[in-house]
Image (cartoon, coloured by chain):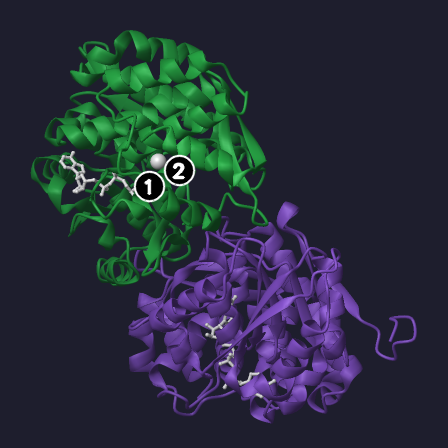
Chain colours: A purple, B green
């Protein structure tokens, strides 16, 4: 099928990072053209390693593998494909899983000309990305995200890594992919709750970076919840555009600009740490965290009350929680004081000024934090 | 002691890598000024982690730690020092040692503003360097090399990494230090054979890159063998200059230029792999490998016979072997055919054209390789 006759136009977002720039292709019904698309980006490819979440093996990883295995590169050499499935879940982001992958790459005769393809959510992208960054000090890497969260957040920006037993994302590398291939078809097997959870990060971009996108979300929430392909593609593309804009200004998190992506997240991490494992999905915690942050901004006179009410309405329209009755103030506060966004004991937050714009506010009184948490119970 | 009144002038070599540029300071009797020197480079330092080879703990790592522990940074904050010793030897470049170091860094409250200092030979530099590259996706890193090989080779150029059980240096990162601090005093505890072995890499730079340095080595071999401080400092500085010139042209080993540093090494790796573990030190194998390569170049009419005789004389004057009676041709050839420098089954070598200049020669007949090996038995 040529792209001219394709019924679903493919959107393309460029991530501007100098000689590490790359494209994010966002389409529908393109899984079986993956091999062709990959060779257009890497015409010399002769060895591809595919690492997939066990939950997406059938049919997604299988169809991707098939689309590769039939192809030859520009020199007429057939592409050799190595395949590995990884158990689903956060516990796979471990030293032992990484070490097994390194050994598997060695056993698969991987060299600097090989490419590693991650097929899964943020767990697989982070894990496989660090394996790609470190094997022979770096090989090429492709992301095929299969959760909405991975499509709009974790597959963009080059952060890769694993967890240590007592601390998340402590070890890793900044390693940019050569291509991100997003196909909305794969979302058809994603449970509703996981899909809706991903929408929280989408709404986040509207609040922190793009008022016009927020308006569009407001008008199209019902289509998004119904997973209308065109609306989903647009929402993903705008989200990737926002994230890549921020990342382009602060690739290695040195200027502080990248911190705005943490809007709602200081609260969310504290909720996740205290609510009991598995109680809330990440995006649900982020939705509640954004509500706490917006409440705090209104309380401190940083923004108008209408921002909070618009954000509340949009989160609700997308089926996301806006309150958390079980929020445990006494447990949350100490967690936040240990959070990375705390500098020299003072609390710092990303707070909205108006829809489309946030700022970093330091020196926040714990009493204001407590009020913000209580406002969402 | 101010540097003006210092009896041993400190040499400084700049490694030119854009915003990753850094200095190599080469001196004598400056161990106890290390804290001062470090703060001159990193005035905001508040947490230093020191990883030392167990063999250099007493007195070198202890004196370095003391020189740090007494100091405060530009804000008057005393420097917090975390210390860890690692067992000597290549087996420490392992996933499990790396994983323990990551956990130790976490337990030591390491963050992006911490600095990791490697004190030891190439083993510690490679291991600690990769830990620094990966912890929170990268923290600052300092090299204090304590073997001659680490001073002239492994501490320069940013290659870091560990071994997999069946393959050396398979996993790692390019991660440049902020400073390399070389003090020739630490060589006083290095056994003679290890010191002499390091001279092979020094002579390598003369052959591949710098004819004037080769002449100087020729004239000063006796001083070097006697470990005359001034001669040793000069030899280290010229070696670092050569290596950083090559690395500056090809930081991530993409253009092929960095391959010239492998002069003698295809033969050396085959010797090391077949001679029996611990039979020869790395530099000894490199000396013999350089002889094989020079013999091959003369044999193929690439250079004059005088190059070989001059190289032979200099290696001998430094106490290095120039022949290896036990060289096993039948075992070495298959190893070389599996070596990274082999492209599409054809043998490729870095061969000298004249003193100070080498080239990459592909398509070499296995018969020529066999003649080269036999010429050194
Ligand atoms: N690198 C970054 O910048 C970044 C940003 C945000 C989050 N993250 C990381 O991402 C991870 C969370 O990502 P996630 O939410 O995608 O989690 P995930 O990868 O664990 O996926 C969630 C669940 O969905 C399943 N799944 C994935 N795709 C599916 C599909 N198409 N159909 C059916 N089931 C499917 C998985 O098996 C898993 O059980 C965390 O580890 C987090 O640290 C990284
Ligand atoms: N990163 C690079 O670019 C690069 C380049 C070349 C080699 N290497 C690596 O370097 C390693 C070899 O380095 P090396 O030869 O320094 O080996 P090493 O680090 O094992 O040191 C050799 C021995 O000397 C001892 N030692 C070190 N300093 C001493 C001192 N001052 N006094 C007494 N004993 C001392 C050590 O305990 C060890 O037993 C290999 O792992 C190799 O892969 C890396
Ligand atoms: Zn998030
Ligand atoms: Zn060497």
Report how far apart the C-alphas of labels 2 and 1 lie in the structure.
Answer: 6 Å
Between B22 and B287, the one lying in front of the other is B287
Image quarter hosting the N terminus of chain B: top left
Within 10 Å of the Cα at label 1, are there few (<14), some (14-19), or many (20+) other Cα atoms?
many
On whether ligand 4 comes within 8 Å of the CB at mark 2, the answer is: no
Residue at label 2? B267
Write the residue at 53% across / 57% down. Answer: A258
For the residues labelled 2 and 1, say whether their Cβ atoms are less than 8 Å apart: yes
Q: How far across and how far down the image is residue B304, in percent?
A: 49, 14
Mark 1 chain:
B
Q: Is residue A295 visible?
A: no
Left or right: A231, with B125 as reference point = right
Whether marks 2 and 1 lie on the same chain:
yes
Q: Secondary structure at mark 1?
A: helix
Left or right: A154, with A375 as reference point = right
Task: Note whether A208 is above or below A199 in the view shown.
Answer: above
Q: Secondary structure at mark 2?
A: helix
Residue A342, picture quadrant: bottom left
Mark 2 chain:
B
Image quarter hosting the C terminus of chain B: top left
| Label disc, if present, on residue B271 of the rendered structure | 1
Write the residue at 12% across / 42% down. Answer: B55
Between B124 and B10, the one lying in front of the other is B124
Write the residue at 60% across / 66% down. Answer: A48
Write the residue at 72% across / 58% down. Answer: A41
């Amino acid at each position: 099928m040529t792209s001219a006759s394709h019924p679903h136009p493919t959107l393309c977002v460029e991530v501007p990072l100098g000689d590490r720039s790359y494209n994010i292709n966002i389409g529908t019904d393109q899984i079986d053209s993956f091999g062709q698309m990959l060779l257009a980006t890497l015409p010399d490819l002769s060895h591809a390693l595919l690492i997939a979440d066990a939950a997406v093996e059938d049919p997604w990883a299988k169809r991707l593998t098939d689309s590769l295995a039939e192809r030859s590169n520009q020199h007429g050499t057939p592409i050799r494909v190595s395949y590995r499935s990884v158990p689903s879940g956060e516990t796979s982001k471990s030293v032992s899983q990484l070490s097994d992958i390194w050994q598997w790459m060695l056993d698969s005769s991987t060299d600097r000309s090989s490419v590693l393809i991650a097929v899964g959510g943020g767990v697989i992208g982070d894990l496989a990305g660090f394996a790609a960054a470190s094997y022979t000090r770096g090989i090429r890497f492709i992301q095929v995200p299969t959760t909405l969260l991975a499509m709009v957040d974790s597959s963009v920006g080059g952060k890769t890594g694993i967890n240590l037993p007592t601390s998340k994302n402590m070890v890793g590398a900044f390693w940019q992919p050569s291509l991100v291939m997003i196909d909305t078809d794969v979302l058809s097997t994603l449970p509703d709750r996981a899909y809706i959870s991903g929408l929280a990060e989408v709404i986040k971009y509207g609040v922190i970076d793009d008022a016009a996108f927020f308006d569009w979300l407001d008008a199209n929430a019902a289509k998004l919840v119904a997973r209308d392909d065109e609306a989903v593609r647009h929402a993903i593309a705008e989200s990737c555009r926002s994230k890549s804009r921020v990342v382009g200004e602060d690739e290695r998190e040195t200027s502080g600009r990248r911190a705005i992506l943490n809007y709602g997240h200081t609260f969310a991490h504290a909720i996740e740490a205290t609510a009991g494992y598995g109680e809330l999905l990440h995006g649900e915690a982020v939705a509640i965290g954004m509500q706490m942050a917006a409440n705090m901004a209104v309380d401190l006179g940083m923004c108008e009350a209408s921002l909070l009410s618009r954000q509340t309405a949009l989160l609700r329209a997308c089926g996301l929680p806006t309150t958390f009755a079980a929020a445990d103030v006494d447990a949350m506060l100490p967690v936040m004081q240990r959070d990375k966004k705390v500098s020299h004991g003072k609390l710092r937050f990303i707070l909205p000024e108006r829809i489309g714009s946030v700022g970093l506010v330091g020196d926040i009184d714990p009493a204001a934090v407590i009020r913000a948490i209580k406002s969402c119970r």
